[in-house]
Amino acid sequence: MKINYNQEDRIFLSVDCIIFGFDNEDLKVLLIKRDFEPEKGKWSLMGGFLKINENLDEAAARILHELTGVHDVYLEQLYAFSEVDRDPVDRTVSTSYYAIINIDKHNKDLTKNHYAKWFSVSKMPDLIFDHNQMVSKAIRRLRRRTSINPIGFELLPEKFTMRQLQKLYETILNKKIDKRNFINKIKSMDILIKLKEKDMTSSTKGSYLFMFDQEKYDSKKSNDFYLKL
Amino acid sequence: MKINYNQEDRIFLSVDCIIFGFDNEDLKVLLIKRDFEPEKGKWSLMGGFLKINENLDEAAARILHELTGVHDVYLEQLYAFSEVDRDPVDRTVSTSYYAIINIDKHNKDLTKNHYAKWFSVSKMPDLIFDHNQMVSKAIRRLRRRTSINPIGFELLPEKFTMRQLQKLYETILNKKIDKRNFINKIKSMDILIKLKEKDMTSSTKGSYLFMFDQEKYDSKKSNDFYLKL
């Protein structure tokens, strides 16, 4: 047995980034309009080629930053897409990455770049290549993760109401959740701090605001736990 | 903005397969001894290069079959490993795949090839390149999956005792599980058929044998469910 490094087996490796955000109403995904052929004018994920002197994590962070201005985002590898004809120009295998970011926190970075725009995942346009499949796969991963880890809280403002948290979970899981049931399950997770402060915008009585208990949150993150909704 | 397909960005893409088995005692992983440089004589996962006319799933199945004789295995993509210096010969990004197989069922295929050998994951040798990292990542994925889906049952014989099932979970999760607690949780999953037949090898009283209810199993597989042990 002998393995050959045949030069004709060399191919292009690209990275595509799926960036999720939440605006208290919808789960959104960040897209850019492609201004070159092929598929010029269509919407696309943030993508580019892996360079010879960087690993995939580094490429994902660099490409996201170059195309949108967004930086300091924890990108997680999702899946390598490798259909032979997925890129009409040349054989390219693309490794997708995803991140969930706080729209408000990163919006000031984003405005520097006029190509990037948020779309609701329920109203996504037809994307280039296999990018719609990538987004679908990322949503499935996000849903599974939401059940295992307290992921998703990064999408909320620092202080939030129970209603906002429920709305976030309903949006990610794409289903209505019983309010009482939700509150009980969240309480049993024991990772929230109830504040004395209230949000008075939604009712005259007001709604208590909550914050995350970062320490407990980190300890739960390392020991997988389960929230079945 | 213009994306260039720079010829110097072309690199090698390989696939490495992590094959898990279970012999009623240990979680095992299939390895082959490398008989060429670099790292000749060391143990390795089953790996090879992606060809220009196949996708990664196809490459993984082909490579596993070529190197071990094993076929008809559901391989799932795990993760792309891309450190710049991971392969000392040339820049190669490797996408790892993993599968759990029934050792008895596939043993007759395996014997055709004298390179492949089962190792307990707790007594693994030092592998080539970053292959030890790949195995560690696959074990973590396997553990997480075991909690979400009724994965792992493929590792048992068709008819099995509750004790065998518990041993499998204890092996994958690498911890002791309380027997009564385990039986209750498994029963609440409602995916087993209790047979009238008993296994008489372990005690004079014997232990009831169980089989999977394939229909229920499939329906649970599609709707993620949770087994927290």
Image: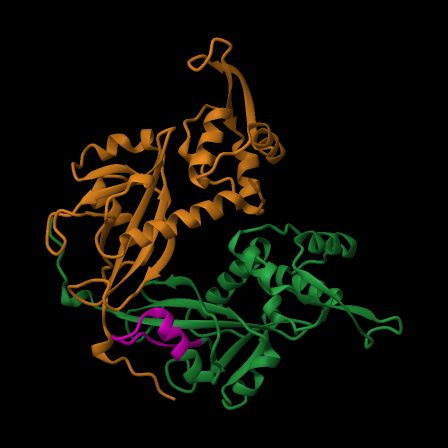
Chain colours: A orange, B green
Q: Hey, which quadrant is residue B21 in on the image? A: bottom right
Q: Nearer the viewer, residue B182 or A218?
A: B182
Judge left or right: residue A141 versus residue B227: left
Q: In this view, does B71 lie above or below B93?
A: below
Q: Which residue is drawn at 27% across and 31% down?
A: A107
Q: Which residue is the extreme one toward the top?
A: A204
Locate residue A146, reporting x and y percent: 49, 43
Q: Which residue is the extreme one toward the right?
A: B204
Judge left or right: residue A82 versus residue B115: left
Judge left or right: residue A111 versus residue A3: left
Judge left or right: residue A198 versus residue A184: left
Q: Which of A116 and B158 is in front in this view?
A: B158
Locate residue B119, reporting x and y percent: 58, 76
Verify whether residue B79 appears in magenta. Answer: no
Q: Give the range drawn in magenta.
A: B46-62
Verify whether residue B53 appears in magenta. Answer: yes
Locate residue A24, reporting x and y percent: 38, 28
